[in-house]
Amino acid sequence: MDPIEHTEITAGLWHLRPPREAEAGDLLALAEDPDTVRWSPPLPSTEEGAAAWVRTQAEWDGRVTFSILESSTERWAGHVTVTGLEGPEPVVLCRVAPWARGRGAATTAVRCLSGWVTAILGTPRLTLVHAPADLAACHVATKTGYPLTSTTPTTHLHARTP
């Protein structure tokens, strides 16, 4: 896969841009949030680990990660990622800070990233997977054009094809 050029996207209240190492403290706070711990894969729990994680995410190698920021204040609100870009079914993951939940950060970020990945990289299908009891993730998936395509006792799979 050719290197992916960094870009920024602004959509209403939210701004997406490549991660910066200065966000490591925000990532650590998100890693301690009970809802994030409950529903998301683990995040680093040390300053060094968080800084390394942010640097890795900013590389855009086989994945694309955008930090989500409030447009007017540039306050960090989370991140949205597409992993597995070299595989047959890339996966979207979004984590949002507690203060930004319910304000459209996740839906805006997932919608923008999905459209960008499809338009720029020509990705034919994207998936979003979450635990069945994670109703917020299910709502975001449905609202952003990812219909529910299959369920198991441990996962709901949503898929989007352009």
Image: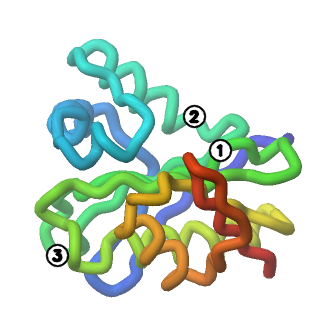
Q: SS of the residue at dot 2?
A: loop
Between the C-alphas of marks 3 and 2, the distance is: 26 Å
Which comes sooner in the sequence, label 3 or label 1? 3
Between the C-alphas of marks 1 and 2, the distance is: 12 Å
**Coordinates of residue 18 in the picture (x, y in percent):** 45, 49
Disc 3 marks a residue whose amino acid type is Ser
Lateral position of residue 60 relative to residue 100, left or right: right
**Coordinates of residue 58 in the picture (x, y in percent):** 50, 38
Examine the rendering and report whether any part of residue 162 can be seen: yes
Q: What residue appears at the point 44 percent right and 35 percent down from the top-left corner?
A: 41
Disc 1 marks a residue whose amino acid type is Thr
Front label number (1 vs 2) = 1
**Coordinates of residue 126 in the picture (x, y in percent):** 72, 63
Which comes sooner in the sequence, label 3 or label 2? 2
Q: SS of the residue at dot 1?
A: strand
Badge 1: few (under 14), some or many (20 or more) residues near its Cα, within 10 Å? many
Front label number (3 vs 1) = 1
Which residue position holds label 2? 59
Q: Quadrant of residue 19?
A: top left
Which residue position holds label 1? 83
Which residue position holds label 3? 72
